[in-house]
């Protein structure tokens, strides 16, 4: 398994899928998807999804942004959004994969300190009992349809991410830097503050005192996508959140997001999501558990 040619690497929402995550998160067994691919998942990336894997039994090999890691029972694997990764599991490996959408991550990371930098590192570590219990609880809750399921899953997701961030920090060399540069972190902070104002790459570059070309080059190296794509993705995440979790009309959402023309918003959303805002909302409603509707 090699990473010398990244141009052929596919970007997925979930491996082999193109639709956006409709639930609070997604949780499945490692075997569920791996067995369909003879226990080997080719190099790919998720541009909007963060994944946490836990190996209960079995093992294999993981390639995370070009680095090879041996997998073992009790292994915790952190795969940040945008990082190229591939797996070759031994047959009958047991464990879980929790996939969290950017929308949920944005909500969880409000006023919780600088955990993004820790969670922005690919890692293979030995899972603590707390992490193993949290993952098991997520699987049990995700598989059911009990009352307040979405609320419980949000809480468990925050707990899991907190334990994972702590584990990564505890196992990192003193002074180790996150893979994303300081410039990209500042760009992301500015995008969070100004995305509703529809700042362009040149506006962010000016605020960061760099050229637009340099900003895009650094952004692509750190995240796999251009600065322009990061800006667009933040707007689209907010659009999906409004479509999924509010009853606002499409035109109202467009105006709320700073679009002067709802038709232009609809075209932009359709280009990004592969389906119209109304179709996306219908898909989310159709995918929601009965207890959440």
Image (cartoon, rainbow, N blue to C red):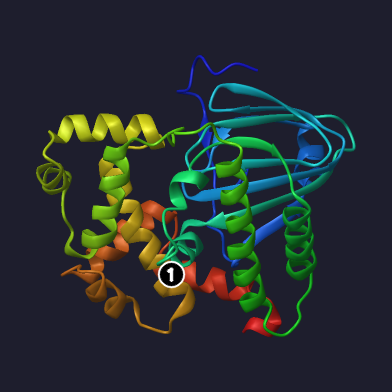
Horizontal side of residue 43 vs 33, given as left or right: left
For the N terminus, the image quarter is: top right
Q: Quadrant of residue 277?
A: bottom left
Horizontal side of residue 54 vs 121, given as left or right: right
Q: Quadrant of residue 238?
A: bottom left
Work out whether 21 lies above or below 148.
above
Check disc 1 and report the residue beneath it: 241
Work out whether 204 lies above or below 196.
above
Residue occupying image coordinates x 60% and y 36%: 123
Of 167 and 139, nearer the camera is: 167
Residue occupying image coordinates x 53% and y 27%: 65
Q: Position of residue 284 (x, y in %)?
A: 55, 70
Of 17 and 141, nearer the camera is: 141
Q: Quadrant of residue 194?
A: bottom left
Q: Position of residue 58 (x, y in %)?
A: 87, 35
Work out whether 172 lies above or below 238.
above
Q: Position of residue 132 (x, y in %)?
A: 77, 54
The count of marks equals 1
SS category of the residue bearing label 1: helix
Circle 1 residues within 10 Å: few <14, some 14–19, many ≥20: some
For the C terminus, the image quarter is: bottom right
Residue occupying image coordinates x 78% and y 67%: 143
């Amino acid at each position: 398994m090699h990473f010398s040619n990244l141009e052929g690497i596919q970007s997925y929402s979930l491996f082999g899928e193109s639709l956006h995550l409709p639930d609070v998160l997604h949780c499945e067994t490692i075997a569920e998807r791996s067995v369909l691919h003879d226990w080997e998942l080719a190099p790919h990336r998720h541009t909007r999804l963060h994944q946490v894997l836990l190996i209960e039994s079995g093992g294999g090999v993981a390639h995370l942004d070009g680095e090879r890691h041996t997998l073992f029972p009790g292994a915790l694997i952190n795969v940040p959004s945008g990082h190229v990764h591939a797996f070759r599991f031994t047959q009958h490996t047991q464990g879980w994969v929790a996939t969290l959408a950017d929308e949920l991550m944005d909500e969880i990371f409000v006023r919780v300190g600088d955990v993004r930098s820790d969670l922005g590192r690919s890692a293979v570590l030995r899972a603590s009992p707390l992490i193993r219990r949290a993952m098991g609880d997520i699987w049990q809750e995700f598989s059911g349809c009990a009352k307040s399921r979405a609320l419980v899953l949000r809480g468990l997701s925050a707990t899991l991410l907190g334990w994972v961030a702590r584990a990564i920090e505890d196992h990192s060399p003193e002074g180790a830097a996150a893979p994303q540069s300081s410039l990209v972190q500042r760009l992301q902070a500015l995008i969070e503050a100004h995305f509703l104002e529809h700042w362009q790459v040149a506006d962010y570059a000016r605020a960061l005192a760099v050229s637009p070309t340099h900003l895009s080059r650094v952004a692509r190296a750190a995240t796999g996508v251009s600065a322009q794509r990061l800006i667009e993705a933040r707007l689209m995440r907010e659009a999906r959140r409004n479509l999924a979790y509010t009853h606002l009309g499409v035109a109202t959402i467009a105006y709320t997001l700073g679009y002067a023309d709802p038709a232009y918003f609809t075209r932009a959303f359709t280009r990004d999501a592969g389906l119209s805002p109304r179709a996306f909302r219908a898909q989310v409603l159709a995918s929601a558990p009965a207890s959440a509707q």
